[in-house]
Image (cartoon, rainbow, N blue to C red):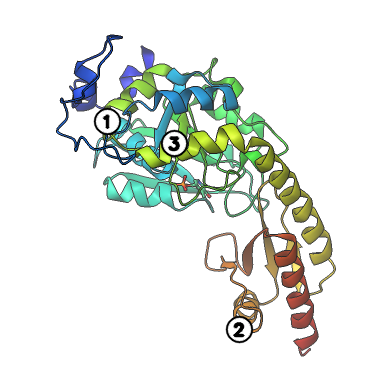
Amino acid sequence: MSIKKYIRKNILSLAPYSTARDEFQSDKKINSYLDANENPYNNGINRYPDPYQSELKQEICVLKGVKPERIFLGNGSDEAIDILFRVFCEPRVDNIITIKPSYGMYKVTAAINDIKCTEVALSEDFHLNINDIFSKIDENTKMVFLCSPNNPSGNLLKKSDILELIEKFDGIVVVDEAYIDFASDGGYREYLDKYENLVILQTFSKAWGMAGLRLGMAFANEDIIEVMTRVKYPYNINILAQSRALEEIRNNKEKIEAELSEVVQQREMVEAKMSEFSFITKIFPSDANFLLIECKMADELYKFLIDEGEILVRNRTNVPGCKNCLRITIGTPSENLDLLSKLKEYEKSIVY
Ligand SMILES: *Cc1c(COP(=O)(O)O)cnc(C)c1O
């Protein structure tokens, strides 16, 4: 495998923990499981979960059109991010590149793993400065983290930029697609056949309404997935999470799709109404379930929404490239109407 050269030596030679159920792989019928020191009385959670999450991966394969061998499941995408660092980056030697503004976990996880993280600024309209990124890459750069649709800006990055990076960068390109279900584009799963240095992150936390369950996905070629699986904790996805996710995918796909199209419709409605307010100076185009708005006095509006509306949004004014910006999640139709009426009140209260 040619991705071998990117993997840390200690990880390549790792002999993973072997679970009780690993050591007995057979179709023979078993009545009594006396091999794992579990409590024998069935309460639904007395047995260890499937460390390979085979049933769930099969269902995700159908849902996403990605083979089970190309799926890694983690305790949120955050686990997948951490595992990627541990697989590819030698502490204090290697480095990664990410973009700013973007999701904060890439930088935090780099710091935890003692990996230098270089943040390359996006352009004013939040697209990649591809030449700046190439100029920061050196021989120890192992990964480039991208996020599309990007958080907090909401926009899809340009496909031609991302593909150029995947083709030219001699390392791993991670594309975080946490918000892809809300987007007008299908993302990069179709490129997994073509590029073995591509890793895609997705999650059940946003569109699928399971943030509390903690279930994230990484899609990549089977060699990368095999190594990531070796590094994870054997039982990283608990029995309740596996069974509830299966249930949601099998029974609630149509409900989720209806919610998704409503959120997108509501986003367009909120965007249209917001554009009428004079104190909102810019609404950035969004392919996600939130809007980034630039306003005249972000701190003041943020506080007004809490004090007068009991509405909490995300104040991003101190984030590079987001001066005077608030990030507002699309809520239920009634929450959105409430937000708009509070914005109207705010407009009336402004003293010029
Ligand atoms: C919300 C979000 C995630 C989801 O993380 P989980 O750990 O799966 O909940 C991942 N990436 C981005 C950019 C996000 O905004």
Task: Using the image as rendered, state which of residue 91 and residue 26 is in the foreground.
Answer: 26
Q: Earlier in the sequence, mark 3 or mark 2?
A: 3
Q: Which quadrant holds the C terminus? A: bottom right
Q: Which residue is mark 2?
A: 307
The type of residue carrying mark 3 is: Ser
**Residue 338 visible in this rendered orientation of the protein:** yes
Residue corresponding to mark 3: 243
Q: Is residue 44 above or below residue 268?
A: above
**Residue 231 vs residue 325, the one in the foreground:** 231
Q: In the rendered structure, which amino acid carries the disc numbered 2? A: Asp
Q: Relative to 195, is 291 above or below? A: below
How far apart, in angstroms, are the residues tagged by discs 3 and 2? 41 Å
Q: Secondary structure at mark 2?
A: helix
Measured from the top left, where is residue 332 in percent x and y? 70, 60
Mark 1, secondary structure of its residue: helix
Q: Position of residue 23 (x, y in %)?
A: 19, 17
Q: Position of residue 151 (x, y in %)?
A: 57, 51
